[in-house]
Each structure stands twice: as structure tokens, then as C-alpha cells.
Image: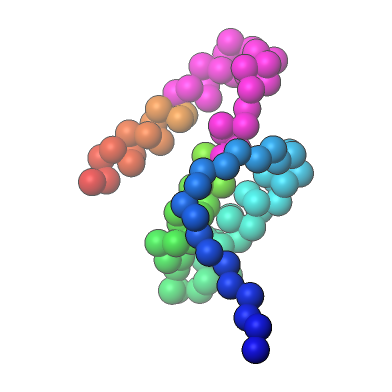
Amino acid sequence: MRVTKWVDLGQEVEIEIGADDIRLALAEAFANVTNDRLGEEGPNRAEIAYTLNSIGAYLKAMTAEHIALLTSAQRETIKLFLTEQAKRYEESK
């Protein structure tokens, strides 16, 4: 009998993903943590981590050129929003 098995080699690799891939990942991640799908049970730790990882991947994919297309007011608004969110995670220790 022959069996196929995945072996994790623990090697970090870098891959290119497109905007559509990111959009789909974010939609899937959001669906994983919405209460209308989960009911009163709510999301589990893995679902929350997956969602945050997807958001992080999206933010990291924004190049300097993308950011430069925004006005200074837009960049400031985004900076303040992300700073506020970072503080929430810092305070939730």
C-alpha cells in the first residue's frame, strides 16, 4: 500500500500573490469570525489568528508606491487608525 503524506520542513519561502488572492483570503477570514456564521459559539483562536494573519499579509503587500498614491490626510488617518488598533492589542495582555 502506498500513502501520500505531507512533511513540514519548517522552511520559510516567499511567494507572490495577487490582489484577487488577498481579497478572497480576507473575505474567507472575515467569514470565519462573523457571528452570523458561528452563532453564539463565536470564533476560536485559530480562526482569529488566521483572520489577523490575512489582514497582516494584505497590509504588508501594500508597496511604497501604493502608499504614495494616498493623500497625506489619508495616510495620517490610516496611521492613526492602525496605531489605535495596535494599542488595543498591547493593552489586552
Quadrant position of residue 71: top right
The residue at the far front in this view is 1
Q: Is residue 1 above or below residue 60?
A: below
Residue 70 placed where, x, y %?
Answer: 66, 16
Does the image show residue 55? no
Q: Residue at x 33, y 41 (%)?
A: 89
- Specify the segment rendered in magenta: 57-80
Location of residue 32 with respect to 62 vertically, above or below: below
39 above or below 2?
above
Q: Residue at (70%, 41%) from the top-left corner?
A: 17
Q: Nearer the viewer, residue 69 or 53?
A: 53
> Where residue 77 appears, x then y in whole percent?
52, 21
- Return the residue nearer the eye: 12 or 26: 12
Q: Main secondary structure of the magenta part?
A: helix
**Residue for point 63% across, 81% down:** 3
Relative height, residue 62 to residue 28 (above, below): above
Q: Would you say 64 lies left or right of 89 here?
A: right
Q: Quadrant of residue 18?
A: top right
Q: In the picture, which quadrant includes the N terminus?
A: bottom right
Which residue lies most toward the bottom here?
Answer: 1
Q: Residue at x 44, y 62 (%)?
A: 46
Image coordinates for residue 23, horizontal then vertical, percent: 70, 45
Where does residue 80 sit, x and y in percent of width and height? Answer: 45, 23
